[in-house]
Amino acid sequence: MSLSDTIAAIATAISPQQGSVGIVRLSGDRAVAIAQQIFNAGGKQVWESHRILYGYVRNPSTGEIVDESLLLLMKAPRSFTREDVVEFHCHGGIMAVQQVLNLCLEHGARLAEAGEFSLRAFLNGRIDLTQAESINDLVGAKSAQAAQAAIASLRGKLAQSLKYLRGKCLNLLTEIEARIDFEDDLPPLDVEWVKTEIDIVSKESQQILATADRGELLRTGLKVAIMGRPNVGKSSLLNAWSRSDRAIVTDLPGTTRDVVDSQLVVGGIPIQVLDTAGIRETEDVVEKIGVERSRQAAKSADLVLMVIDASVGWIEQDTEIYESVSDRPVILVINKIDLIDKSSNPNLLQGKENLPIVKTAASQQQGIDDLETAILQCIQQDAIAAANLDVAINQRQKACLMRVVQSLANVQIAIADRLPLDFWTIDLRAAISAIGEITGEEVTESVLDQIFSRFCIGK
């Protein structure tokens, strides 16, 4: 990759007959020159920065008009990449944007690599590494809260906190190294002050660390499997919960033959709900495959909703199903409570009183709020909400912050053991380096490649 190249890519999702606008983006020294070769602006429109021009994209070789479009010109350094940037706003679909991109490539641009626009913005000092990662998080956000967390980081919330902590560590390092080099010329080092400052940085680092689980949930979501024997109301529960008719509901057992999924958001957490085939022994080949897929879905789920029929009570088959999922977190859903014959007093719990229990009447839309509350409690939503929700760090940032906390703990140990000041600086430098890896102030090319390879081509 070379920053001297001019790069081009399609910057919008493109599908046949979908999307009214498609954008082709150019960035680099030759962006404007390439645009002027292929774009004819009518009348006396002026090619000035941050102006929108109207005209036609034309193939200079043949004179053929490829598309009617708008051109947005942003001259360096007032652009996302801090390079000259040109965007062609074309008609949506495949052919128009692809032909415009091909013309850009034929006239001197090269196809951008994954995330290269954002990488250039980082390398040119437009954004730091936390902001770059937040762009990808914002594009992939599955809930409003995930988007808000990404926007907070994009606006520099995480970077500000980390730069403050890094500044404190650098100040400590300066004071300690000054005593090593000029011990006779300076007053003695205030050890209590050093310990207090390290404690402040460590505690604030741990507060940011506490958002890692929240961040992971916001990004990847939770996979929830609805399990149970046939005809206990699993599909009705999914339909009531998702407020749709994703699953077929009948009185016949074995109607659901495969795993049906629905995407929901609960308390800001994206949830993939899997409605599985009823677990039972069967000679039906297709249903048997569905049952096996259901068992596999349960094994991959983060949480299992085990549904039993309140009108029948807990039976031996329920015990077998529970034992097959008991290695997962389980919520017991007692469905069809509207059909309970109180005189028969069915056994509903079978010694499972220690499980979270929710009573529902899915066909009547009852108990869904209680179910969502139980799910949030299972993922410790309250504990997570107590953390600093202005940011939600990712796993790479978490690993770096864990090194920061450990390095600072090592400094405290060195102080307590009365080791020479040189030993203090070793771990203090390690903490500074780890924070720098998060913001990009100290980062290797291989780490950058790993981060930006996850971006789409046009970002």
Image: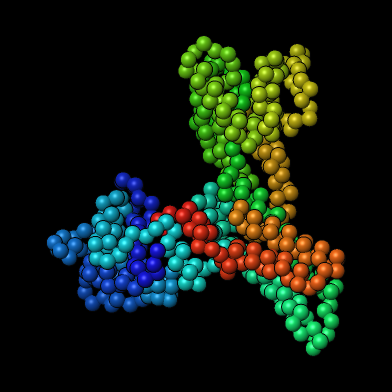
Q: In this view, does 220 lie above or below 367?
A: below
Where, by quadrant of the figure, is residue 191 drawn? Answer: bottom right
Where, by quadrant of the figure, is residue 334 drawn? Answer: top right
Please provide percent x and percent y for residue 62: 13, 61
- Residue in view at x 71 percent, y 71 percent: 169
**Is 40 situated left or right of 423 in this image?**
left
Please provide percent x and percent y for residue 404: 70, 62
- Residue in view at x 52 percent, y 28 percent: 259
- Is residue 336 among what the camera can see? no
Where, by quadrant of the figure, is residue 315 drawn? Answer: top right
Q: Is residue 31 above or below residue 322?
A: below
Which quarter shows the N terminus?
A: bottom left
- Residue in view at x 54 percent, y 22 percent: 292
Q: Residue furthest top?
A: 283
**Is 106 situated left or right of 408 in this image?**
left
- Give the camera-side residue of 252 and 228: 228
- Give the camera-side residue of 140 and 55: 140
